[in-house]
Image (cartoon, rainbow, N blue to C red):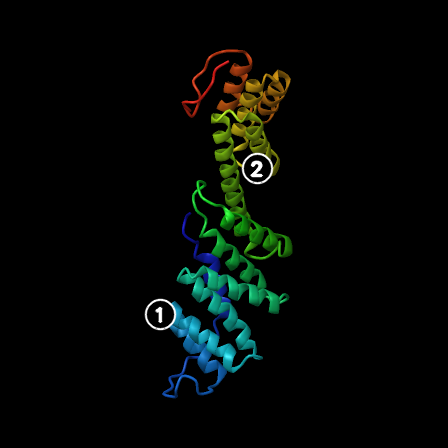
Amino acid sequence: MTRRSSTPLALALALLVVGACASDSDEPEYVERPVSTIYNEAMDTLNEGLYAEAAVKFDEVERQHPYSSWATKAQLMAAYSHYEINAYDEAIIALDRFIELHPSNRDTPYAYYLKGLSYYEQISDIARDQRMTRQALTTFRELINRYPNSRYARDAKIKLDLTSDHLAGKDMEIGRYYLRQGHNLAAINRFKAVVEKYQTTTHVPEALHRMTEAYLSLGIIEEARKMTAVLGHNFPGSEWYVDSYQLIEGKQIRPVDEDPWYKVW
């Protein structure tokens, strides 16, 4: 998965940075100090790229001054610090807490966005479990539904499309496996799920073509013709439609993906 875009995060940081300068102190770490001092030291540490240390300092803001507005900002910045060192579990826990405690805060949309990214950047290839993909999908959808006009909604929509395509790819992989094994009804159910749940993804034309194959294997000619008609209506220039049409007409063709299990009728 492509590494994160820095622009939304940079904008969020700009909103959260305070104008006061950090002050040096020789006091012991746990001696109570002014909240602005602790917060700005944490920001300095963050800007130096010492994210793990920054997270500790942001937590100290909340520990010493739990009811201040600085503590609210520090909660979010601690989560961001965890995110920057790929400590995604810690980031998600912190973000869930922020969202629960501050549902109406102006930075809550950003918290949803950062949570979505924390799942998104753990997405594995389609051959593996897709729990993180589903979590990213759920989080980005919640962000878009709750805050459709936020500055993060646009990027969330792009990533939502990518996660949907990834999940559709997983169903396609399973469906093709069933088709190779001759489990045509199971394959049809997977391909149908792609068509119904992920209509805007790039996998729909192939899913319709594979359903044509499966129905022909089962001898259900009318359903195969229906799938080909739907494919031709929605994707008339697709190679998958050409293949489906030739299957229905009984012509031998070379499959686009050259699967060795391909059967010609």
Q: Could you tell me if residue 107 is visible in this image?
A: no
The residue at the point 50 percent across, 64 percent down is 12
Where does residue 23 sit, x and y in percent of width and height? 40, 83
- Which tag, 2 or 1, sits closer to the chain's start? 1
Residue 57 versus residue 158 in the image, above or below: below
In this rendering, is residue 173 above or below 212?
below
Indicate the position of residue 178 as horizontal and vertical percent values: 50, 29
Give the residue type at disc 2.
Answer: Thr
Are circles 2 and 1 on residues that touch, CB within 8 Å?
no
Corner quadrant of residue 99: bottom right
Rendering coords of residue 151 (x, y %): 55, 57
Q: Decide: is 238 above or below 57.
A: above
Q: Can residue 40 be seen here?
A: yes
Q: What residue sits right under mark 1 in the picture? A: 48
Residue appearing at x 48%, y 85% in the figure: 34
Determine crowd level at label 2: few under 14, some 14-19, many 20+ residues with C-alpha closer than 10 A: few
In the image shown, does 179 or 100 lie closer to the viewer? 179
SS assignment at label 2? loop
Report helix, strand or loop for mark 1: loop
In the image, what residue type sits under mark 1?
A: Glu
Label 2, label 1: how far apart the Cα atoms are: 42 Å
Q: Position of residue 75 (x, y in %)?
A: 51, 71
Q: Which residue is mark 2?
A: 200
